Image: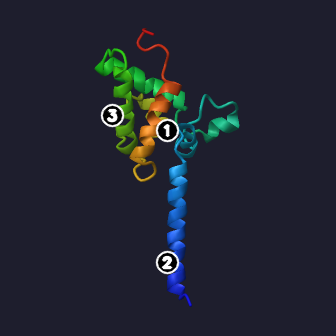
């Protein structure tokens, strides 16, 4: 007969196994975006006043555009895939270690939204490897610093 202690231990193993299975299944970038980003970053501007009041972070397209343009302006100009690589590296670092020194946001944006919280422990490095290149490709600006 199983003791209460053993039942709890087995339950814990089952719960952990289910969590690991679900994490392994969550491998597409759009799924990761919905689960890890969309709770704060909308896609596009809010459509009405009620939605506008719920906004807690800049829309993802606005955020990515700002990051790409700032990186190219401060550290570039970059050629070919260099801008993509620099942007992805910055985003991965910033997601875990956000700071006012790193952000390219204007003071009024920080006053409105504050700094992004660190997502350490919420999103894994493996998930970032899947997600961030996709986010870059989906939301990068078509024109950077006057160039296409």
> According to the image, label 1 marks what residue?
113
Q: Quadrant of the C terminus?
A: top left
Q: Position of residue 11 (x, y in %)?
A: 54, 74
Residue found 41% across the figure and 12% down from its top: 145
Per the model, the C-alpha gap separating discs 1 and 2 is 42 Å
Give the secondary structure at mark 2.
helix
Would you say residue 116 is visible in this rendering? no
Q: Residues within 10 Å of mark 3 (few under 14, many from 20)?
A: few
Q: Position of residue 42 (x, y in %)?
A: 59, 35
> According to the image, label 2 marks what residue?
9
Q: Quadrant of the N terminus?
A: bottom right
Residues 92 and 19: in front is 19
Q: In which image quadrant can residue 33 be found? A: top right
Would you say residue 70 is visible in this rendering? yes
Give the secondary structure at mark 1.
helix
Residue found 43% across the figure and 41% down from its top: 128
Residue found 43% across the figure and 14% down from its top: 144
Q: Can you tell which of label 2 and label 3 is closer to the viewer?
A: 2
Residue found 37% across the figure and 44% down from its top: 96
Q: Which badge, 2 or 3, comes first in the chain's sequence?
A: 2
Q: Can you tell which of label 1 and label 2 is closer to the viewer?
A: 2
User: In this view, which residue lies farthest toward the bottom?
Assistant: 1
Figure check: 30 above or below 67:
below
Residue 102, labelled with which disc? Answer: 3
Q: Which badge, 1 or 2, comes first in the chain's sequence?
A: 2
Q: Position of residue 50 (x, y in %)?
A: 69, 38
Q: Position of residue 133 (x, y in %)?
A: 45, 31
């Amino acid at each position: 007969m199983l003791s209460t202690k053993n039942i709890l231990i087995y339950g814990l193993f089952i719960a952990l196994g289910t969590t690991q299975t679900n994490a392994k299944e969550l491998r597409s970038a759009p799924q990761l975006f919905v689960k890890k980003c969309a709770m704060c970053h909308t896609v596009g501007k809010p459509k009405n006043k009620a939605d506008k009041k719920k906004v807690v972070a800049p829309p993802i397209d606005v955020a990515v555009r700002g990051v790409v343009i700032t990186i190219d302006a401060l550290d570039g100009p970059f050629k070919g895939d260099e801008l993509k690589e620099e942007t992805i590296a910055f985003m991965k670092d910033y997601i875990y270690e956000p700071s006012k020194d790193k952000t390219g946001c204007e003071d009024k944006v920080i006053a409105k939204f504050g700094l992004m919280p660190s997502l350490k422990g919420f999103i894994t490095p493996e998930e970032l490897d899947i997600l961030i290149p996709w986010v870059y490709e989906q939301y990068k600006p078509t024109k950077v610093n006057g160039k296409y």
